[in-house]
Image (spheres, rainbow, N blue to C red):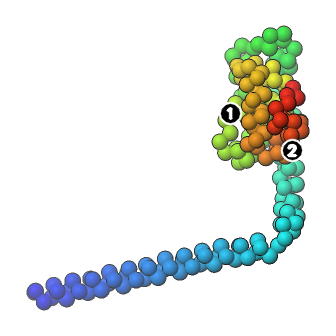
Amino acid sequence: MNVLSHILIIIIGLLLICILQVLSLWLSLKRRKEERAILEMRRLEDSHTPEERESMQQPETVVQKNSFEQELRSGSEEFRSSQAYELLSKLKFMPENTLPESERRTIVVEISNSFDGVIRELYDAVPDIRRADINTCMLSFLDCDNDVIAAIECVSPAAIRQRKSRLSKRMPPEMFDLIMHSDVKNCREGIDNSK
């Protein structure tokens, strides 16, 4: 019995060693395959001049910009046909720019519904974007000035200007420019264009 248990322990030990060797070999092959893939990607990247790389990426950027622009237009049309648009129009002409909380909430909810595709793209472009930033973007696209946006967000117009300036640094310039209807450079320099 004693000899049999020793043989069994030796066999189990050898099996464990074999299993570990196979696992080690598999991990080594996997690592080499990943390294080859990285080297191949670098080789392909280095084989093109910067101009060629830019021209290869440009069509996709143009398509993305056109798609985003179409999403903005579609969302705008949907929003303009809603009751929330009437509330927003009313707010634009109120001297104090004040609306009851329920009406402000109606506007914000309708923005979420109408611009859902745009909002998804904003989250893709700026993953940590806040809901207030999104509202600022969409209201700016709808031609609301800082006073109106401030009234809906319950902040000061100066806070909206600061928010836009911060967004101009975080968002892709093409996206920011489409949304704000403005020159990105002006906003980055802190010039308020009342949009």
Is 118 on the left-hand or right-hand side of 2?
Answer: right
Quarter occupied by residue 119: top right
- What is the distance, in whole Å, between disc 1 and disc 2 at their CAs? 20 Å
Image: 94 above or below 64: above
Label 2 Cα crowd, 10 Å radius (few <14 / some 14-19 / many 20+): some
Q: Position of residue 78 (x, y in %)?
A: 83, 34
Give the labeled residue for mark 1.
Answer: 131
Say whether residue 110 is visible. Answer: no
Residue type at numbered disc 1: Arg
Front-most of 190 and 75? 190
Residue at the spot x=82%, y=32% of the render?
Answer: 190
Residue at the spot x=72%, y=13% of the render?
Answer: 100
Quarter occupied by residue 92: top right
Front-most of 141 and 158? 158
Q: Which quadrant, please, contains the C terminus?
A: top right
Image: 13 above or below 73: below
Is 90 on the left-hand or right-hand side of 104?
Answer: right
Mark 2 element type: helix
Say whether residue 11 is visible. Answer: yes
Q: Earlier in the sequence, mark 1 or mark 2?
A: 2
Give the labeled residue for mark 2.
Answer: 69
Q: Which quadrant, please, contains the N terminus?
A: bottom left
User: How many numbered dots are placed on residues in this image?
Assistant: 2
Q: Position of residue 110 (x, y in %)?
A: 75, 29
Mark 1 element type: helix
Q: Residue furthest front?
A: 189
Residue type at numbered disc 2: Glu
